[in-house]
Image: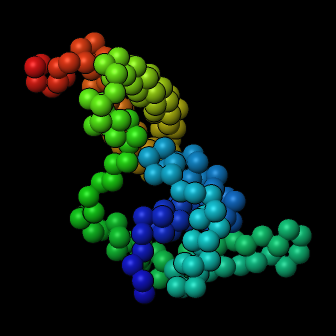
Amino acid sequence: MPELGPQDHIVLGLVARHGPLTPYDLKARVEESVDYFWPVPHAQLYRIPVRLAEQGLLREEAEETGRRRRVFHLTDAGREELERWLSEPKCPPAETRDPAQLKLFFADLGAPDDVITLANDQAAQHLHWLDQYRTLQAEIDPNDSVRAESRSRILELGIMHEQAYVDFWKALARNPTRSPSTGR
């Protein structure tokens, strides 16, 4: 079986958590959950389940009448793969493809005020995400113990991550000629 990637595990995990899903249902579930930190192009959410079904990790059930939707169910092999993946503590290095970091790297080639403008814009964007994560955390249903704990953990990480970005960009906007961490 070919090596599965993060998006494959997202699909397996969402079907395991929510039960049988159509690709359209997957799209909605991605948008309300992992899309905040791991976006998956919608077109892939129509291709991935078919490929996972071909590998025996999902089972496809096509409606005979009506809209003839394709519904995907987790198989025993799919559950075993998901459990194997979750039990493996090692992860590949995180990928950071942040356009603002790229601009910051080359900032010395631009106008001096470009750093301040970039920093103010980034502080505002990350403040927006910080507020959004705090709102999502406040909306967690404490009666849904399994999902509440899982959602709370990921939102706590997101809040801390965004707070660090806000702090960095605000400090840089205040004094763009020094390093915010060293003060020089």
On the picture, is 175 further left or further right than 30? left
Quadrant that contains the N terminus: bottom left
Between 106 and 180, the one lying in front of the other is 106
Q: Residue at x 46, y 31 (%)?
A: 129
- Could one spot residue 166 in this view of the protein? no
Q: For the C terminus, which image quadrant?
A: top left
Report the colour scheme: rainbow
**Residue 26: quadrant of the picture:** bottom right
In the image, residue 72 lies at what x, y percent? 64, 73
Is residue 155 rendered to the left or right of residue 105?
right
Left or right of 23? Residue 81 is left
Q: Position of residue 23 (x, y in %)?
A: 67, 64
The residue positioned farthest toward the top in the image shown: 174
Residue at image position (25%, 18%) is 176
- Residue 58: percent from the left, percent from the top? 57, 78
Q: Position of residue 20 (x, y in %)?
A: 64, 68
Q: How many marks?
A: 0
Whether residue 176 can be seen here: yes
* Residue toward you, 116 or 92: 116
Work out whether residue 168 or residue 25 is closer to the camera in this orientation and state it.
168
Q: Is residue 21 left or right of residue 92?
A: right
Q: Residue at x 78, y 70 (%)?
A: 69
Quarter of the image for residue 167 reads: top left
At horizontal 48% and vertical 64% (from top left) the residue drawn is 7
